[in-house]
């Protein structure tokens, strides 16, 4: 009996989500701790509605930000009026122990534009308990 292992590398487009059966903007938003309006805005040009989505449909989660110089993840979160936790949810490939984003690193950001629980003053600090 011959046993073999194989490794495959799969590149996944950053800041994109593939809809599963039964998904809606509301259910996807809940998974990423954001608001469905954020997702709708990120997909406005595609005519995407808030109702059930066709399985397999690619959805934009937000914007891809290319880090211009090394910066702490918590500082990136502040820049986009979000939290570090939400930034990490949108970038699952970044190890939890990695505190810095390097120059040229691409990060998916879901700005907190529809979230009254996060300060829009550049601090990214919660103004109230996280509603998600």
Image (cartoon, rainbow, N blue to C red):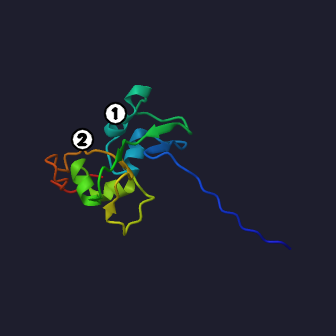
Left or right: 107 as drawn, with respect to 21: left
Asked whether residue 42 is in view, the answer is yes
Left or right: 123 as drawn, with respect to 11: left
Q: Where 46 sits versus 55, above or below?
A: above
Please give the name of the residue rendered at 31% of the width and 43% of the height, measured from the top-left corner.
35
Q: Where 2 sits versus 24, above or below?
A: below
Quadrant of the image containing the N terminus: bottom right
Left or right: 16 as drawn, with respect to 69: right
| Badge 1 element | helix
Q: Quadrant of residue 21?
A: top right
Q: Quadrant of residue 112?
A: top left
Instruction: Measuring from the top left, give residue 76's x and y in whole percent.
Output: 26, 53
**Alpha-carbon span between mark 2 and mark 1:** 10 Å
User: How many tags in the picture?
Assistant: 2
Please give the name of the residue rendered at 70% of the width and 63% of the height, measured from the top-left corner.
6
| Badge 2 element | loop
Instruction: Measuring from the top left, give residue 45's x and y in whole percent.
Output: 40, 26
* Mark found first going from the N terminus, 2 or 1: 1
Left or right: 55 as drawn, with respect to 119: right
- Residue picked out by circle 2: 113
- Residue picked out by circle 1: 41
Please give the name of the residue rendered at 26% of the width and 53% of the height, measured from the top-left corner.
77
Whether label 2 touches label 1, CB < 8 Å:
yes
Camera-side residue: 19 or 123? 123
Q: Residues within 10 Å of mark 2 (few under 14, many from 20)?
A: some
Marker disc for residue 126: none
Q: Residues within 10 Å of mark 1 (few under 14, many from 20)?
A: some
């Amino acid at each position: 009996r011959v046993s073999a292992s194989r490794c495959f590398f799969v590149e996944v487009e950053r800041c994109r989500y593939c809809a599963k059966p039964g998904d809606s903007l509301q259910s996807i938003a809940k998974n990423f701790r954001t608001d469905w309006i954020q997702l709708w805005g990120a997909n406005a040009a595609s005519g995407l509605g808030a109702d059930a989505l066709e399985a397999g449909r690619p959805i934009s989660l937000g914007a891809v930000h290319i880090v211009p110089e090394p910066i702490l993840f918590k500082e990136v979160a502040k820049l986009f009026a979000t939290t570090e936790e939400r930034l990490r949810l949108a970038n699952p490939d970044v190890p939890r122990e990695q505190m810095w984003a390097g120059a040229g690193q691409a990060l998916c950001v879901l700005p907190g534009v529809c979230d009254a629980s996060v300060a829009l003053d550049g601090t990214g600090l919660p103004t109230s308990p996280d509603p998600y």
